Amino acid sequence: MRRVRRSDVDRWMARFVGIVSSLCGLGAIAILVRLGIAAFSVPHRLTAGALLFGAAIVLIAGFFLSVDYRLTFNRPNLYGSILGLTGWRGLGVFFVAIAAVLAVQAARRRELDALAYALVSAAASCWCWMRAFRIGRRQNDRRAVDAYLDACYADFDDARAAALQANRAAQLPAIDISPSQGKFLQLLARSIGAQRILEIGTLGGYSTLWLAGSLPPDGRVITLEFNPRHAAVARSNFERAGLSDRIELREGPALESLAAIERAQEGPFDVFFIDADWVNHPQYFTWALKLARRGSLIVFDNVVRDGAIVDTHSRDAAVRATRELHERLGSEPRVLATALQTVGEKGHDGFALALVVADS
């Protein structure tokens, strides 16, 4: 059966918009070329307004061509880097500056051309700011939905709240899972009666606290962290929560720690939560299979990469590794696996879940 990535209507709409965008971009480039010809043929007409307007046209052309590139080849990582919230605001400020300079020139010299250029630049700035506002409002809506779901489902816990505060105070990367995602992990672990959990990527230990909360009194979490500073913050969070007896944090490269766990025959583990250096996710999957049993659950976080995984030509090592992970999860006969994309306060990402159905 042929796999359909988008509906026919969406596909033809993308093509139509791509063609229109390309024509607009080419038109903008033609205007820039015309300005250059005029400048060389009549040097005294090479005004500051023409130069500034030419710079604006270059940006507009680049914008339209980048949109066309994204729609044609579906490369959202490029789309996000160019058209992100910061980019829209920056472009809006740039057009405002151009409009102000040209407006001053038009007032002083009474040049209608400069006034026309200023109006075009002002309109472009307004459009960019409207786009930035829409993106910001959409992001705020996602945060509001997450906050509502967290209030409904994620049990408030002083120790976990203190851990998040301590992580912020220590200026750790703000990449902790959300409370609802933590509750989801806890439910997964409880649903299979997990007693031994292996986590790769501790950070400040927020996800570890959720996992440890799913264990019986004699349960155990082994969590691996490469960064000593992160590990120190996590240990403090574990002690504050009173869960140090259930959590063992091991520092160092995760691949070395995994090899040591295998040598010590500390497996099998019931649940694996893998949220570490993404370029090594395929290797972590290999190790998880070695240390798993029939019925174990393997959970990977950050497997959508803001949609960049559809970029077959990406040069991003993390994107390439994530694509390899998906291909292996989908073809590995020892697991039943799927992946879901998520949208929330953490942006556009997702997780993959694999159930081990055969012994390694």
Image (cartoon, rainbow, N blue to C red):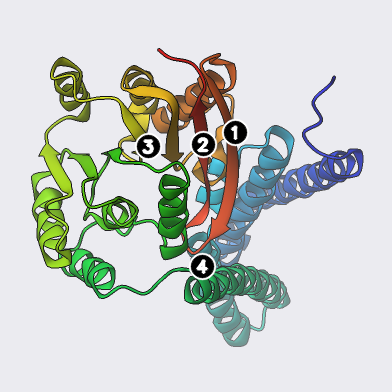
Residue drawn at 55 percent across, 50 percent down: 80
The residue carrying pointer 2 sits among few (fewer than 14), some (14 to 19) or many (20 or more) residues within 10 Å by Cα, namely: some
Dot 2: what SS?
strand
What mark, if any, has residue 94 been given in the picture? 4
Residues under labels 2 and 3: Cα distance? 11 Å
Q: Amino acid at mark 1?
A: Thr
* Label whose residue precedes the other's in the sequence (1 or 2): 1
Q: Is residue 133 above or below residue 88?
A: below
Q: Are marks 1 and 4 in contact (CB under 8 Å)?
A: no
Q: Give the image location of residue 97, x and y in percent.
A: 51, 74
Residue occupied by mark 3: 271
Residues under labels 3 and 4: Cα distance? 51 Å
Q: Give the image location of residue 84, x and y in percent.
A: 53, 57
Residue occupied by mark 2: 353
Check the picture and name the quadrant holding the C terminus.
top left
Dot 1: what SS?
strand
* Label whose residue precedes the other's in the sequence (3 or 4): 4
Residues under labels 4 and 2: Cα distance? 45 Å
Dot 3: what SS?
strand
Dot 4: what SS?
helix
Q: Is residue 196 above or below residue 40?
A: above
Residue drawn at 42 percent across, 49 percent down: 190
What mark, if any, has residue 26 been given in the picture? none
Residue occupied by mark 1: 338
* Label whose residue precedes the other's in the sequence (1 or 4): 4
Q: Amino acid at mark 2?
A: Leu
Q: Residue furthest bottom?
A: 107
Residues under labels 1 and 2: Cα distance? 6 Å
Q: Amino acid at mark 3?
A: Val
Q: Nearer the viewer, mark 3 or mark 4?
A: 3
Q: Nearer the viewer, mark 2 or mark 3?
A: 3
Is residue 8 visible in this depiction of the protein? yes
